[in-house]
Amino acid sequence: MYVGVLEVDVLLGDVHTLKQKRAVVRPVVAELRRRFEVAVSEAGNQDLYRRALIGVAVVSGDASHAREVLDACERLVAARPELELLSARQRMLGPED
């Protein structure tokens, strides 16, 4: 069993309140969850209204499949016009860990 983790740090566009931030981040989280069947959450920077840290986790029997899913999640976030991808970091945990 392999567990893949993706942390995506994004800068939000024209957002001036935490309520507006939620209106931008929630649909992205929901789309990731729906499209890729992954566990996903806003995992950091909750008090900053123009930044968000989105965490994604996937469990798979194959490490390459887990990486493919995380890469697709990263591409989806990068393609959103209302978000600017600042950084993305992947980690993989396997049977030897």
Image (spheres, grey):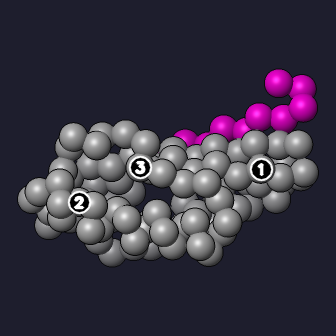
Which residue is tagged 1?
59
Q: From the top left corner, tell me how far across and down residue 94 is, in percent.
A: 84, 35
Q: Quadrant of residue 91?
A: top right
Q: Which residues are magenta?
A: 87-97
Q: From the top left corner, tell me how far across and down residue 27 is, in percent.
A: 40, 71
Q: Is residue 25 above or below residue 62?
A: below
SS at mark 1 in the image: strand
Q: Is residue 64 above or below residue 83?
A: above
Q: Is residue 92 in the magenta section?
A: yes
**Badge 1 density bin: few <14, some 14–19, many ≥20, Cα 10 Å:** many
Which residue is tagged 2?
21
Q: Earlier in the sequence, mark 2 or mark 3?
A: 2
The reply to whether residue 27 is in sight is yes
Q: Residue at x 48, y 69 (%)?
A: 30
Q: Residue at x 65, y 59 (%)?
A: 38
Q: Quadrant of residue 39?
A: bottom right
Could you tell whether 88 is left or right of 9 in the image?
Answer: right
Q: Nearer the viewer, residue 39 or 90?
A: 39
> Tag 1: residue type?
Val
CA gap, disc 2 to disc 1? 29 Å
> Tag 2: residue type?
Lys
Q: Is residue 72 above or below residue 55?
A: below
Q: On residue 42, which mark appears? A: 3
**Badge 3 density bin: few <14, some 14–19, many ≥20, Cα 10 Å:** some
CA gap, disc 2 to disc 3? 11 Å
